[in-house]
Amino acid sequence: MTATYEVRGQVAVITLNNPPVNGMGLVTRQAVAAGINRAEDDAAIKAVVITGAGAAFSGGADIKEFGSPKALAEPNLLSLISLVEACSKPVVAAIHSVCMGGGLELSLGCHYRIAAAGTKVALPEVKLGLLPGAGGTQRLPRALGVEPALNMIVSGEPVNSELLAQVPGQKLFDRMATGDLMDEALALAAEVADVRPLPRVRDLKARFIEKNANPDAFFQFARNMVGGMSKNFPAPLRCLEAVAASVTMKFDDGIKAERAGFAALMVTPESGALRHAFFAERATTKIADVPSDTPTRTIAKIAVIGAGTMGGGISMNFLNAGLPVVMLETKQEALDRGVATIRKNYEAQLKKGKLKQDKLDARMALLSTTLSYADIGDADLVIEAVFEEIGVKQAVFKQLDEVMRPGAILASNTSTLDLNAIANFTKRPQDVVGMHFFSPANVMKLLEVVRGAATAKDVLATVMVLAKKIRKTAVVSGVCDGFIGNRMIEQYSRQAGFLLDEGCSPAQVDRAAEKFGFAMGPFRMGDLAGNDIGWAIRKRRYQEKPNLRYSKSADLLCELGRFGQKTQAGWYDYQAGKRDAIPSPVVAEMLDKHRAALSITPRQIGDDEIVHRLVYSLVNEAAHLLEEGIAQRASDVDMVYLTGYGFPLWRGGPMCYADQVGLFNVVQAMKRFAKNPLDDAEFWQPAPLLARLVAEGKTFS
Ligand code: T1G
């Protein structure tokens, strides 16, 4: 049963009960409809209260049902809401915790709404590439006012119930609960039991809060604003048009317009990708052989070794979550610099109004520093973020092994070194794990949690729980060179280099990648991160793999000292203090000479070939990672690229994109690339997993 029915005096109480968030799946909808009909038929019942059990009123339609017949099976959400609204007895929605999507739409079909303070209220469908499809675009503007309703629908962001209750003239909440929500809902139900006619949101006019607002001018301005946002995917603009219909059309016609928009969006690749990403993000927390109820270790104090860019950024994550951090360095001035950088970051947020002074002070009070390992022995977790050289890591981990209390977790932020080798510098490899943050560590959502051969299951479980606390998307990776993200980006970078050898300019490759949706193309990215970082990795890596072909253009660039923005010259030129990437004649000449030395006649390369070589190189390498068990699932790889490498969210990640293109087509393109003598034919052999999926007509997800 996913909704219960009980009688309290003369009031029927229908309680949604479909854990974890009371998704309005078919069985739940049927149960609510049955409850309404039962109350309608029972003469002793004077009113109805609808509420949600557990941690939510309702998180909305059951997204898992989308694409299946269940989603549209009667009563679909729209019919259920009409049934509630047509009930001859007053229906009161008792809202708490989370009231989103179809859950809010259900409440808008009720005649009255009482909300607990702190309830997160949203119509987040746009984040799934959709629009509210059960009357939300028609009722919310009538209940709340056009401007706030449009903001909520186009942004998809939650707003606290008490803020909405303050909107001038709002009819969203008839009352805010001050005590027990159910008691007050029952009291309200008794109070309105005889009110006739029953108030219906649909009978209100969608009104502007700004007096004399001109609808056409308002929506034209809004279109211009939203048009930019949705240059890549259609949902925001369609949301806007549906809200405009609440002003320009009669209710029933507006509902029809909303349904048409919803149906059109449901079948777009962008919505499929965004729904994929929604579940992919939540799937990352599941580790095949580590049950979700694995006991975790208590993490009350954290030590960070290194107060540089990474150490400082890592520390801020924990300070922001209210956890004390002790930063350790070898020199006082390094500590002073690290603390000053953290304070400067917080003060910049303060200036932008993103942080209050008391919060800033509280965070800084949680930060302490030391030059002595003796001071960190009682920490529950220590994360080293020292120079990326195995000898330095060895010295640090030997010391940690000496001083850290038994049961402390020893984490390395290494991005390229062998975690098993690092673990073996200690006598407790079971307590060693990789926590690979991405720079800037206090901003980037991705955290690669590297599982060593000996890493204990409770250590993994502890780090995954901690990652959620510091609002990171944690993806488990096995041990290999580059883990998941950087091993894939190596192939992506090789393709970018080959494209230069064959005739592209850095700007052409970047433009194609950014038109595809990457936040930044490979060369602008290199200039931002520092081309010397890749240079050092290539030197090490290609000593180990002398036969691996790659373009020498990046090495030539570094030999000119063109490390990127930090040297005001990289693949592009930069004016002092500016980040605008200016195509560089020096680089153009360097590339011409480089091609001539290789006797390469440059050729025109189209955007499609550029994008497909870049993206499919990620896909093929990821297929190897999946076969080797380095990545647990294809959707994990997608999350790595969506949260750590600027892959466009509305494409769902490289694996989702490959599935949407069709793996058969991906492999056909790879076969074409393999024929290019200047490319790497061996690399473009489809990974066995990819070949098998194509042969079986299957997809990654
Ligand atoms: N449908 C199905 N499953 C859902 C779900 C939903 N709407 N919301 C959450 N879950 C699952 C989630 O996959 C996870 O599962 C578990 O619940 C806990 O989620 C017609 C068309 C509600 C704020 O977009 O924003 O209504 O991994 O880890 O941090 O107009 O979930 O445990 O197996 O996120 O406490 C619109 C999406 C739907 C809300 C709770 N609604 N959900 O956050 O838990 S479309 C949404 C959220 C719609 C109508 C339209 C959050 C949350 P598992 P969680 P949380």
Image (cartoon, rainbow, N blue to C red):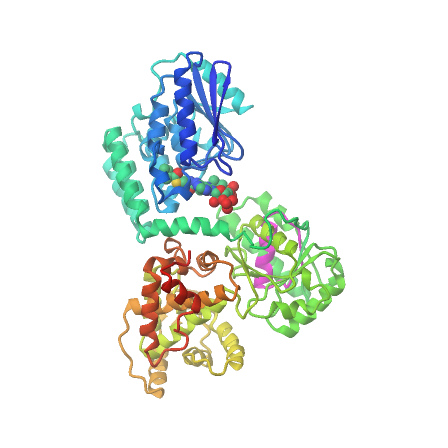
Q: Please say if 673 is above or below 276.
A: below
Q: Is residue 159 left or right of residue 359?
A: left
Q: 680 or 412, which lies in front? A: 680
Q: Is residue 283 left or right of residue 224?
A: right
Q: In this view, does 614 lie to the left or right of 546?
A: left
Residue at 52 percent of width and 24 percent of height: 181
Quarter of the C terminus within the rendering = bottom left
Is residue 355 shown in magenta? no
Q: Which residue lies furthest to the front in this view?
A: 696
Residue 652, how many percent across, how many down? 39, 55
Q: Please say if 505 is above or below 359.
A: below
Task: Tell me the quarter of the picture where residue 387 sits.
Answer: bottom right
Residue 415, how many percent across, how many down? 55, 67
From where the camera sits, is residue 176 visible? Answer: yes
Residue at 44 percent of width and 68 percent of height: 621
Residue 561, how many percent across, how many down? 47, 78
Is residue 306 shown in magenta? yes
Magenta region, residue range: 304-327
Residue at 37 percent of width and 64 percent of height: 695
Task: Tell me the quarter of the picture where residue 65 sits.
Answer: top left
Q: 39 or 323, which lies in front? A: 39
